[in-house]
Image (tube, rainbow, N blue to C red):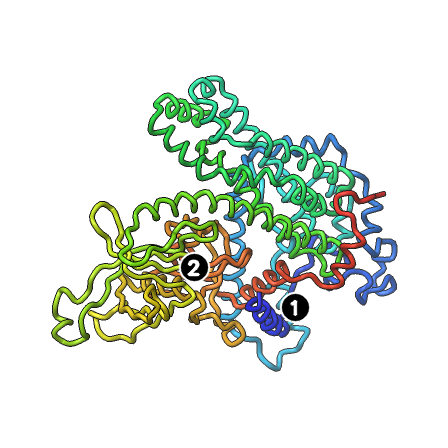
Amino acid sequence: MELLAAAFSAACAVDHDSSASESDAREPAAGHLPGSESSSTPGNGTTPEECPALADSPTTLTEALQMIHPFPADSWRNLIEQIGLLYQEYRDKSTLQEIETRRQQDAEIQDNEEGSPAPEDAPEEEEEEEEELASPPERKALPQICLLSNPHSRFNLWQDLPEIRSSGILEILQPEEVRLQEAMFELITSEASYYKSLSLLVSHFMENERLKKILHPSEAHILFSNVLDVMAVSERFLLELEHRMEENIVISDVCDIVYHYAANDFSVYITYVSNQTYQERTYKQLLQEKAAFRELIAQLELDPKCKGLPFSSFLILPFQRITRLKLLVQNILKRAEERSERECTALDAHKELEMVVKACNEGVRKMSRTEQMISIQKKMEFKIKSVPIISHSRWLLKQGELQQMSGPKTSRTLRTKKLFREIYLFLFNDLLVICRQIPGDKYQVFDSASRGLVRVEELEDQGQTLANVFILRLLENSDDREATYMLKASSQSEMKRWMTSLAPNRRTKFVSFTSRLLDCPQVQCVHPYVAQQPDELTLELADILIILEKTEDGWIFGERLHDQERGWFPSSTTEEILNPKIRSQNLKECFRVHKMDDPQRSQNKDRRKLGSRNRQ
């Protein structure tokens, strides 16, 4: 967080010079009042005398809310029923739209930077006219979140709802409020899509009579876990969101409801996701060992209800939803007014969701780590004093083969084939174990050291023979002495990955945000990637990451902005964000989402009772 704080301060300075020109060039949205020339809300310098259209209009959102009629319950139910997308389809469309929006923003700024500058002696009025002509059409100023576009539903956005169009509210609300409404509307409609997919998992697969006869009760329990509890929570959650929507067509807030459920009900997600390791293994075994199961699942997947989606995509729905829900709340938080009550509820909801997601991840890791540590312990034979491997607080970070240099570094030894000897490293979060592989898939341990007493050093370029070689230094090894190893990796990326894992505090190329902010690269994920090794990072579409290290053979060590997770991933799965203003904005939004509690927020929280608010 100290790193992000430094970046945020510098990002604010970068944006300060360009913010005024951007706001002047911004095209009024559909929510803009006739005759106004900026997006200022009433009370921010614009008076009824200066703008007669504001004389009879509400000056605050609260007054606007009081003027609007509730959303008809029948209309809202019809809208929910019209949602034709399964959650998997919604999620893909939403993330792809996010990627495309960033690409367009990147392209627009690049085009602007490459264009010729206006003459210095040109009149200011002429410049303003050119900016207005170059501005996009009025409709594009509103958020284009094509979430649920499908042939059966005409209403993709909150602002497209007939009740919204006919109410006249778009002539009252400012563009930022419209964007916030869209963000909250997305959370509600996506929950409806998610519930629809969960219902299909239960009714079409879990409750299939033929499948019940094929599966043993224990197999069915592992396969479907507590999905009924998850669906019941989703149903209650969606019902409360629907009631909030029915209270008023202008949504007052949804994050207070999210907070209540995250704090009290979303533990069902932890139970379900923690079972993921056993669920995946059982599913693979059933496909391999039970032909009847394999044939029936293939038959059920062909049903038009599934829209070509595999059974496995339904099983991972809860994990996908709880992580996506956190991102949806982040989206609301970015659009909420700073130091407002809605910002406070969004921060509280995000904090609770973050705890749930972390518990889910820990549940998965705990199950897999325990089995992995038992397996490693069985394969080790100690040539030195035995070191207990299994511990509740220990887990594997990286393992693999390296080449150890043997003999003096002379021209004669450099020409021999026996210069390097194979060794095998197991790196845990608190321990390094150095072995040699022996017959029978066993490993003979000949040295070890506490991870905190490990140092690494990269050799300068010394020719092809010593390419990808680094020095591993144990300040205190198993014999209580200092030991040094010269190790060779198979590639540059493998060397960098070992050095990063062995000494995580080693300075990386782009680590100094304060001195290199403008040059600090960012990428967005355009192809999902599943981590293959413990030091790798699983990427989802539209993830934004900061590059901390980059190799010439196509690997990146980066930090994901929305959760600060670090790891390696192929550069081919991402594309660089070239626009420095967008990179700066990404850092500012990240800092805002993860900022620490301040006194004002604490006071607001004390005055608030989340989930049980009284409304007129």
Tell me the SS state at disc 2: loop
Disc 1 secondary structure class:
helix
User: How far, Cα to Cα, is label 2 from label 1?
Assistant: 64 Å
Number of the label disc, if any, that sits on residue 376: none
Mark 1 neighbour class, 10 Å CA radius: few under 14, some 14 to 19, many 20 or more: few
Position of residue 264 relative to residue 583, above or below, is above
Front disc: 2 or 1: 2
Q: Position of residue 319 (x, y in %)?
A: 53, 41
Q: Observer-nearest residue: 546 or 404? A: 404
Residue 515 in view here: yes
Residue 500 at x, y percent in the picture: 39, 64
Q: Which mark is residue 129?
A: 1
**Where does the image place residue 10, in percent across and percent down from the top left?**
58, 73
Q: 374 or 568, which is in the foreground?
A: 374
Instruction: Residue at 65% x, 73% y: name it.
Output: 126
Amino acid at circle 2? Asp
